Image: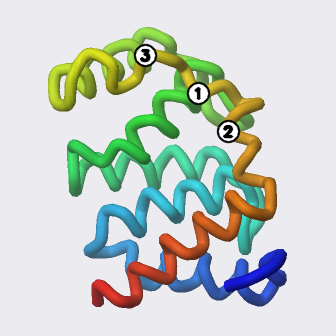
Amino acid sequence: MKGNPTVEEQSEAFNLALDNSSDIPMAHALLGLFYEFGVGTLVDCREAEKCYRRALEMQPENCLAFIRLYDLLYFGAPNVFMNPEEAENMKQRLADMVGPNSLSWPLSREKASGLLDCSCRRDVMRRAWCIQKII
């Protein structure tokens, strides 16, 4: 994929992640990103939270889901209640699994909004299309 992703490409990536989210943890994590930032769908932070939690149920070491869920809980988002205590517990669990520097910074909403940049959005969609190769 080159250049800015079209609306059709974004919708295709969203639908691909949605179709494969039942059995692939990374598809759930990507679906959460799509919902959180409105890639191929409307922004729905509550649905994003559900997707991240499901990805972590399926694969407890899914760092993408950990980081994004941590951010939603730590900073809050529309329809997602701030829960810094749960966020800190998650941070500790991740540090126990992969090391103390695994999440030494909270991913601020400003940094996360970089996903709206075209180059980052293309990377997220490439990951979604990689799911198709796994299947």
Q: Amino acid at mark 1?
A: Leu
Q: Quadrant of the C terminus?
A: bottom left
**Residues at marks 2 and 3, CA–CA distance in whole angstroms:** 15 Å
Q: Residue at x 64, y 87 (%)?
A: 12
Q: Amino acid at mark 2?
A: Ala
Q: Tell me the crowding category of disc 2: few under 14, some 14 to 19, or many 20 or more residues within 10 angstroms, Cα based.
A: some
Q: Which residue is mark 3?
A: 104
Q: How many marks?
A: 3
User: Which type of secondary structure does the marked residue at label 1 adopt?
Assistant: loop
Q: Earlier in the sequence, mark 2 or mark 3?
A: 3
Q: Which residue is mark 2?
A: 112
**Residues at marks 2 and 1, CA–CA distance in whole angstroms:** 6 Å
User: Which type of secondary structure does the marked residue at label 3 adopt?
Assistant: loop
Question: Percent from the top left, x then y, of residue 13?
Answer: 60, 80
Point out the residue furthest to the top here: 85
Question: Percent from the top left, x then y, of residue 104?
Answer: 43, 16
Quadrant location of residue 103?
top left
Question: Percent from the top left, x then y, of residue 105?
Answer: 51, 17
User: Which of the two discs, 2 and 3, sits closer to the camera?
Assistant: 3
26 w.r.t. 8: above or below: above
Q: Nearer the viewer, residue 118 or 97?
A: 118
Q: Which residue is mark 1?
A: 107
